[in-house]
Image (tube, rainbow, N blue to C red):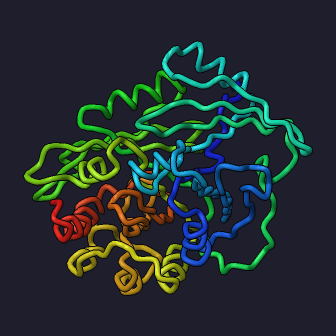
Amino acid sequence: MAQKAMDRVDYVEFYVGSAKQWAYYHKFGLGFNIVGYSGPETGIRDRVSYLMEQGRVKVMVTNSLYPDSEISNHVRLHGDGVKDIAIRVNNLDDALNDLKERKVVKFEKPVDVKTDSGVVHRSRALTYGETVHSLIDYGEFESKLPPNFEPVEFVGTERSGVTRFDHIVGNVEDKKMDRWVDYYVDGMGFEPLISFDDKDISTEFSALRSKVVHYNNRKIVFPINEPAPGKKKSQIQEYLDYYHMPGVQHIALHTDNIVETVSKMKREGIQFQSAPDSYYEEMAKRVGKIDEDIATLKALDILVDRDDDGYLLQIFTKPTGDRPTFFYEIIQRKGAKSFGKGNFKALFQSIEKDQARRGNL
């Protein structure tokens, strides 16, 4: 089998109002270590960035040092949010040649970033809204930190147990989902994985549609959501109203022990969506035998769903910023390959309570 042009998600970069505060949130709330810093002290005059790691998850947070810049304008319009889902490629020339042949994806002219540690080859491909995919080839680069980053003095953090990116979800406008699914399938070589219509994902008041694409045997997984008509406003439309454009709704972080991970995060003040008591009364009948104690899951508001391959456990944070836009999901898979279809109603009812309090339902 020929080698795939792309490998996996390398890191996700947020444009934010305060990189230092976002780094603090990830370090002390989510259990990341701050491993790198970039700014005026490292020769970068217009911005400050922190790089954080936990397991194979890398998150970069960046803020501008000037009031009128791409970063400042992004934050002014969208609030704090994801700008770049960077993808590690095995060979940038091969990856760009593949994109050229497919004639769908627009990308920037490649650049070579030369440093004392070697050369990084990179380009940027455009996707929904103002989101981009940096395509990065580290084949001639030896440092563990990106160019123009310096290591941060290590201060131990009690890690929460996050191991890798599970999936990254984008929200797009009504009737635009299929266009973006085709963009990834026809333009970047992804494959369709699963789809959900508004009968699968709905409550009494709101609904949405979702399709999932993946690449390289699920090393990269991108669900794409669009709002569907309902009695009231869906959470997807609320996101679009506040983000003012399509963008990344949430990032799912995988853990091998969700009870320990969520317990740690809750002790550090991370707020999660709650589930009604009635959800747990039917859990044993709905999902069958599981290893975890249901009373413990109820105390932590962790949801469970089963498919033909096993079961999964998941929970969703409240929005990480002031706008009701981006949030995190924590997920543990015990064989299950799906995305928690049986939990959609309980999750959305919880989100709708918050929407109603904001006056946006």
Left or right of residue 41, residue 329 in this image: left
Left or right of residue 207, residue 109 in this image: right
Tell me what residue is drawn at x 37 percent, y 66 percent.
322
Q: Which residue ends up furthest to the left in the rendered image?
A: 231
Q: Can residue 284 be seen at all in this image of the molecule?
A: no
**Which sits in the foreground, 199 or 187?**
187
Figure label count? 0
Q: State the image coordinates of residue 187 (x, y, percent, origin top left).
A: 50, 23
Above or below residue 351? Residue 12 is above
Tell me what residue is drawn at x 80 percent, y 72 percent.
153
Above or below residue 261? Residue 216 is above
**Which sits in the foreground, 129 or 5?**
129
**Which sits in the foreground, 127 or 256?**
127
Q: State the image coordinates of residue 195 (x, y, percent, origin top left).
A: 33, 40
Above or below residue 3? Residue 302 is below
Above or below residue 84? Residue 65 is below
Q: Quadrant of the C terminus?
A: bottom left
Q: State the image coordinates of residue 231 (x, y, percent, origin top left).
A: 7, 52
Q: State the image coordinates of residue 193 (x, y, percent, origin top left).
A: 43, 38
Tell me what residue is drawn at x 46 percent, y 53 percent.
81
Q: Which residue ends up furthest to the right in the rendered image?
A: 116
Q: Can residue 245 be seen at all in this image of the molecule?
A: yes
**Which sits in the foreground, 252 or 237?**
237
Tell me what residue is drawn at x 48 percent, y 66 percent.
330
Toward which corner of the image does residue 349 lie, by quadrant? bottom left
Q: Quadrant of the N terminus?
A: top right
